[in-house]
């Protein structure tokens, strides 16, 4: 499990322990950066340090699309209950299934029933 995961401020810090206990390298943004930092700063840190951003915030995917960036990869969780005790098993399964894509550059969106992968950079066809 070579993907390193940076958990955004909009997700509970418990995700770091949950993912670490499952064998993933994970840190919560509050332990490495300014909790009030803008999304662009978080993304720049993730690129510089080789992390995938794990978030509940749609802005990260929008930034990837608007800038056509090649990174960082983003794992975006959708739903009302995004705590590890509810979505943890699903996130672990998706991480295992999409690890290579996340290493290469992808936006992976996950909900309770399915996940979708968009390869970076995100391009729009007319």
Image (cartoon, rainbow, N blue to C red):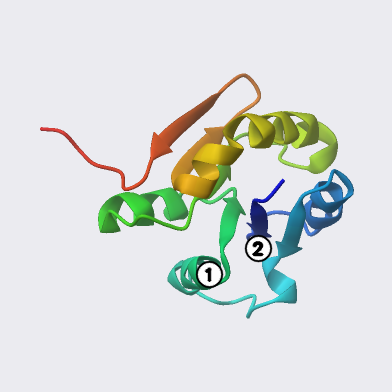
Mark closest to the chain's N terminus, 2 or 1: 2
Depth order, front residue of 5/111: 5
Q: Where is residue 75 in the image (x, y as percent from the top left)?
A: 56, 45
Vertical placement of residue 70 versus 48, above or below? above
Q: Where is residue 21 in the image (x, y as percent from the top left)?
A: 89, 48
For the residue carrying disc 2, how many other residues have a C-alpha within 10 Å: few (<14), some (14-19), or many (20+)? many
In-image side of 61 versus 36 (left or right): left
Q: SS class of the residue under badge 2?
A: loop
In the figure, residue 115 lies in which quadrant? top right
Mark 2 or 1, closer to the camera: 1
For the residue carrying disc 1, how many other residues have a C-alpha within 10 Å: few (<14), some (14-19), or many (20+)? many
The numbered dot on residue 118 is none
The numbered dot on residue 42 is 1
The residue beneath circle 2 is: 9
Question: Outermost residue, bottom direction?
Answer: 34
Q: SS class of the residue under badge 1?
A: helix
Q: Where is residue 93 in the image (x, y as percent from the top left)?
A: 71, 29
Q: How many labels does the image show?
A: 2
């Amino acid at each position: 499990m070579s993907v390193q995961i940076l958990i955004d401020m909009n997700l509970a810090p418990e995700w770091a322990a949950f993912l670490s206990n499952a064998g993933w390298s994970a840190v919560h943004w509050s332990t490495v950066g300014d909790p009030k930092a803008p999304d662009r700063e978080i993304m720049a840190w993730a690129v510089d340090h080789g992390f995938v951003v794990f978030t509940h915030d749609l802005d990260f995917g929008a930034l990837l699309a608007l800038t056509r960036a090649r990174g960082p990869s983003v794992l975006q969780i959708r739903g009302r209950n995004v705590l590890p005790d509810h979505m943890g098993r699903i996130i672990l399964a998706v991480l295992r299934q999409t690890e290579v894509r996340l290493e290469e550059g992808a936006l992976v969106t996950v909900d309770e029933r399915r996940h979708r992968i968009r390869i970076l950079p995100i391009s729009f066809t007319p």
